[in-house]
Amino acid sequence: MASVTGNIFLFIAGICIFSLFTGPLSRPAPGGDAAVGYAWSLLLVNFIFVLSMIFAAIATSVKGGYGWIPGQGFSRFLLIASGLTGILGSVVIATLFRYEGGQVPAVVKAINQSVLWLLPLILIGGHFVLLNPGIGNSVPDGLVRWPLTVTACIGVLILIVALGGFMQQSAIRNGRLIKQAQDFEDSNTRRILADIDSCDVSKNLVFILVFTGDNQPHHIQKKAVDKVKTNHQWEAELIRLLHTGWASEVFQFLASNDIDHPGLFPDAIRAGIHNQALSIRESIRRSSHPSHFYPSLFTWEIERVLRTIERFKNSGVDFRPSILELKDALHEPTEIKKPDFQCEKMLDKWLKAN
């Protein structure tokens, strides 16, 4: 029974190899949508081939065909599994990357050019002999054992080198991506510093307030704050901006930095919160698609407001009505279903504590 079952799986494995060598899968992938079907077919055939050979190996073991392999129990199983994995892994890698135009380890290209067809044929042929004693008795032992042994060793070696090559290329690629990201960050930092340097704070102070928050690298934040303060009327300008649609930018500054005259700001902060609420309402009214809403929407703005208020909690001003107005803005009517905004929980927590 084991021989019959094993032979069936060897036959299936042979069909898979035949299709990989002579059928449409032996040619480069077609263009267009057909490439998707090609890729899935290649994966499926390889999967069936590997599965068939595993079952054939199990049948061979049951039949006692691996009795010539040294060792017993787990040690013998480890040798068999290693050799089988090496051959199957090499074949799969070779067939999947046969026509890969990108960077592929040299050993994989070598498999494609030389031993791609040889490994599976020796594997299938050798197991066919081991599974069928009638045939095996007429074949010299060395004619089966040595080819299988050498093939297994070659397969393991190829698999190890191929995987090592892929790992090396992955490391090189990741290093290149890290360098590109670092170069972009450096370039972006230089651009930001140049924008801060060139900003005329007597007229356009508001445009660098976004760089004054503690979410920025310290050297950028410090440079932006120092630049803002070169305008001798910077506090008056922040107060003026809180009464405009630029309130969100001012809260970015106030949430992260100290000011010289805190007593000048509480009323302006309430005005800024009012303008922030108007901005939220307007944003909700302008939304025309469900994708415009997401749970974290407005979280950044609300967090900056609450952090600002925390800095002025000893000013003697009651900010509770302003926070209620901000919360009410989140419920601005719209025909589009809104999610539960995370920032509303932040507001509720503040209201509960105050």
Image: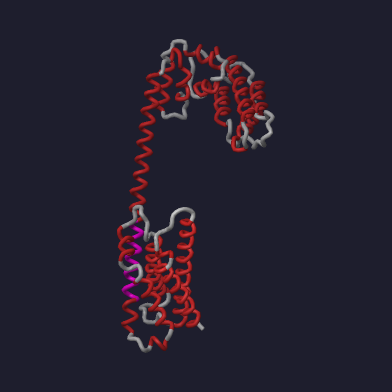
Question: Which residue is drawn at the image coordinates 37% and 23% (left, top)?
Answer: 194
In this rendering, position of residue 46 left or right of residue 115 = right
Give coordinates of residue 329: x percent, y percent.
Answer: 65, 26
Instruction: From this view, report whether residue 327 is shown above or below residue 101.
Output: above
Say left or right for 196 vs 261. Answer: left
- Residue drawn where x is 31% and y is 73% of the image: 150
Vertical placement of residue 109 versus 126, above or below: above
Q: Is residue 162 within the magenta segment?
A: yes
Number of residue marks: 0
Residue 189 found in image quarter = top left
- Residue 247 in the image: x percent, y percent? 55, 20
| Direction from residue 269 to residue 67 in the image, left or right | left
Magenta stretch bounds = 148-165
Quadrant of the image containing the C terminus? top right
Name the residue nearer the viewer: 49 or 194: 49
Residue 14 in the image: above or below residue 340: below
Taking depth in this image into account, of 296 and 94 the one nearest to the observer is: 94
Residue 261 spot, x, y in % from top left = 51, 13
Please identify the quarter of the rendering in which residue 49 is found. bottom left
On the image, the x and y values in percent for residue 185 come to 38, 34
Q: Nearer the viewer, residue 244 or 351?
A: 244
- Colour logic: secondary structure
Q: Residue at x 40, y 87 (%)?
A: 135
Which secondary structure dominates the residues rendered in magenta? Answer: helix
Quarter location, residue 299 = top right
At x 41% / y 78%, what residue is drawn?
127
